[in-house]
Structures are given as structure tokens and as C-alpha cells.
Image: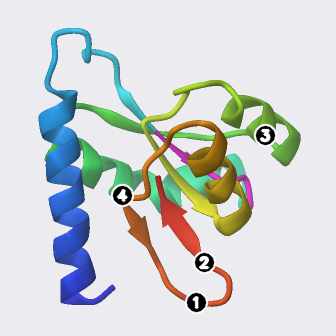
Amino acid sequence: MTKGRQAAARAALGIMALLAACAACARPLKLAVQPILSEQATRRAFTPLARYIGHIMGRHCVVAVSPNFLAYWQNMRRPHNYAFVLDAAHFTDFRLTHMGYHLLVREPGTQSYSLV
């Protein structure tokens, strides 16, 4: 990630931190990641990102793991089940179009992953 993208990501997370500052926000934030790896490997790979988000947001953030894509899809369709989602383009489009999520970070390219 370039310095410009890192700065944009930090700014977006900072804005989200301001919006999330409320008494009802005592629950941990959830960062959802597609179940491409095993549950253990997913947690190991994405815990540093969850910790960074938690640090920026001033709240605990955990990696939400689904055992398979069927469970992931079912969880994904629940409104506001996750605070942040690292997702592929087709799932990102669904979230933006049907669930009111906002795009925070996108890695450009033919096949992209986005943080919503």
C-alpha cells in the first residue's frame, strides 16, 4: 500500500472513529474476512489489521471468521453484523447496493478487495 493510500485509510478510519463515539459502542467491533483460509490461519493473518483498526477506533476489534462460504453469506446478509469487511468485488457491490455500507478503501485492479 502506498503512502497516499495509507493516509487515506487512516483518514477514513479516523472519521469512522468520530462517528462511532457513543455509549452504546462498548461491544467489540467485528472485522469480517472471507473464509478463504482456515479459521486459525484467517485469525493469524488478519489479527494485526483488527488490532490496528481497534487502536484507531479506540475500541476492541476482533476478526470474525466463518467456517465456509455458506455461513459467510448468511452472516453477510444480516444488517450491520460487521463493523468492517474485507471483501471481494461482488460481495462489496452487494453490501454497497443493498445494505448501506460505505467504501473506505479499495485496492485497484481487475480483481479487487475492498474494506467496507
Label placed on residue 109: 1
Q: Which residue is mark 2?
A: 112
Q: Pointers 4 and 3 in contact (CB under 8 A)?
A: no
**Which type of secondary structure does the marked residue at label 1 adopt?**
loop
Q: Pointers 2 and 1 in contact (CB under 8 A)?
A: yes
Q: Nearer the viewer, mark 4 or mark 3?
A: 3
Instruction: Name which residue lies at 68% across and 36% down.
Output: 76
Calculate the distance from the C-alpha at mark 4 to the C-alpha at mark 3.
22 Å
In this image, 110 relative to 21: left or right?
right
Picture coordinates of residue 13 (x, y %)?
22, 52
| Mark with earlier residue (4, 1) | 4
**Residue 29 lies in what quarter of the image?**
top left
Q: What type is the residue that disc 3 sits on?
A: Trp
Q: Residues within 10 Å of mark 1 (few under 14, many from 20)?
A: few
Picture coordinates of residue 23 (x, y %)?
16, 10
Q: Pointers 4 and 1 in contact (CB under 8 A)?
A: no
Q: Residues within 10 Å of mark 3 (few under 14, many from 20)?
A: few
Q: Residues within 10 Å of mark 2 (few under 14, many from 20)?
A: few
Q: Pointers 4 and 2 in contact (CB under 8 A)?
A: no
Q: Which residue is mark 4?
A: 49
Q: Nearer the viewer, residue 49 or 5?
A: 5
| Mark with earlier residue (1, 3) | 3
Q: Nearer the viewer, mark 1 or mark 3?
A: 1
In the rendered image, the vertical position of residue 43 relative to residue 30, given as above or below: below
Q: Look at the image and tell me in which quarter the N terminus lies.
A: bottom left
The total of numbered circles placed on residues is 4
| Mark with earlier residue (4, 2) | 4
Q: Which residue is mark 3?
A: 73
Calculate the distance from the C-alpha at mark 1 to the C-alpha at mark 3.
24 Å
In this image, 30 relative to 93: left or right?
left
Instruction: Name which residue lies at 71% across and 60% down.
Output: 37
Instruction: Name which residue lies at 36% across and 57% down.
Output: 49
